[in-house]
């Protein structure tokens, strides 16, 4: 088995994982955003264990999906198409130039939501509500990025 074959096998596995993660993320999105998520709702997380669990699932799934794409799938795709691996920021810029992601800046902003979603609900319901709403509004951005990789792989007959 060649290195290219190994990379293709890993890409297939990661694309399957990413698609499953997206499905679970969309389910969690429906659970959390069945009504607007406001700072008032965020304040109830310390007493409403059911809502807290749903928010935790959404946050975890959002971060995991972004990590799967950004840290794994994109790196392997870049390797497969013959791009040299550089810093994470350089790779994002290259992905933007190649049309895989729409915006490096948006990607980095979404990555920055992690701490706000994970740590801020105890101290700042407003920050948490804002971060969750931003994440929710950008699920399609992440999905489009994944779809662009999958489309490219199919066009190369690699998936």
Image (spheres, rainbow, N blue to C red):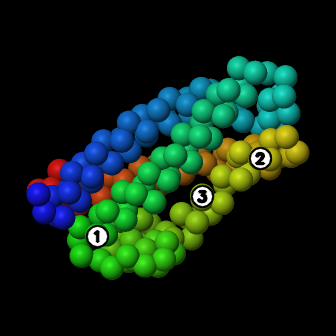
Q: Are marks 1 and 2 in contact (CB under 8 Å)?
A: no
Residue 126: image x %, image y %? Answer: 83, 46
Q: Secondary structure at mark 2?
A: helix
Q: Quadrant of the N terminus?
A: bottom left
Real-space Cα separation, disc 3 to disc 2, in angstroms? 15 Å
Could one spot residue 130 in this view of the protein? no
Q: Residue furthest front?
A: 1
Alpha carbon distance from label 1 to label 2? 34 Å
Pointer 3 residue: 110
Residue depth check, mark 3 versus mark 2: number of the one nearer the observer: 2
Mark 2 is surrounded, within 10 Å at the Cα level, by few (under 14), some (14 to 19) or many (20 or more) other residues, namely few
Q: Position of residue 99 (x, y in %)?
A: 35, 70
Compare marks 3 and 1 and give the one earlier in the sequence.
1
Give whichever of discs 3 and 2 has the lower sequence position.
Answer: 3
Name the residue tied to disc 1.
Answer: 79
| Sequence-first tag of 1 and 2 | 1
Q: Which residue corresponds to the image point at 37% horizontal and 76% vertical from the top-left?
A: 85
Is 44 positioned to the left or the right of 56 in the image?
A: right
Q: Nearer the viewer, residue 137 or 131?
A: 131
Residue at point 71% right, 25% down?
51
Identify the residue under disc 2: 119
Mark 1 Cα shell of 10 Å, populated few (<14), some (14-19), many (≥20): some
Which numbered mark, 3 or 1, is in the foreground of this view?
1
């Amino acid at each position: 088995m060649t290195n290219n074959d190994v990379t293709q096998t890993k890409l297939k596995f990661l694309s399957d994982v990413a698609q499953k993660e997206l499905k679970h993320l969309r389910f969690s999105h429906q659970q959390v955003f069945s009504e607007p998520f406001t700072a008032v709702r965020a304040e109830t997380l310390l007493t409403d264990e059911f809502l807290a669990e749903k928010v935790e699932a959404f946050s975890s799934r959002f971060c995991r999906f972004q990590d799967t794409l950004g840290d794994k799938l994109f790196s392997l795709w870049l390797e497969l198409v013959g791009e040299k691996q550089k810093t994470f920021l350089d790779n994002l810029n290259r992905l933007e130039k190649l049309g895989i992601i729409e915006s490096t800046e948006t990607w980095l902003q979404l990555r920055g939501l992690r701490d706000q979603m994970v740590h801020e609900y105890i101290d700042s319901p407003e920050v948490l509500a804002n971060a969750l709403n931003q994440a929710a509004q950008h699920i399609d951005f992440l999905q489009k990025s994944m779809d662009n990789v999958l489309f490219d792989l199919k066009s190369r007959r690699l998936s």
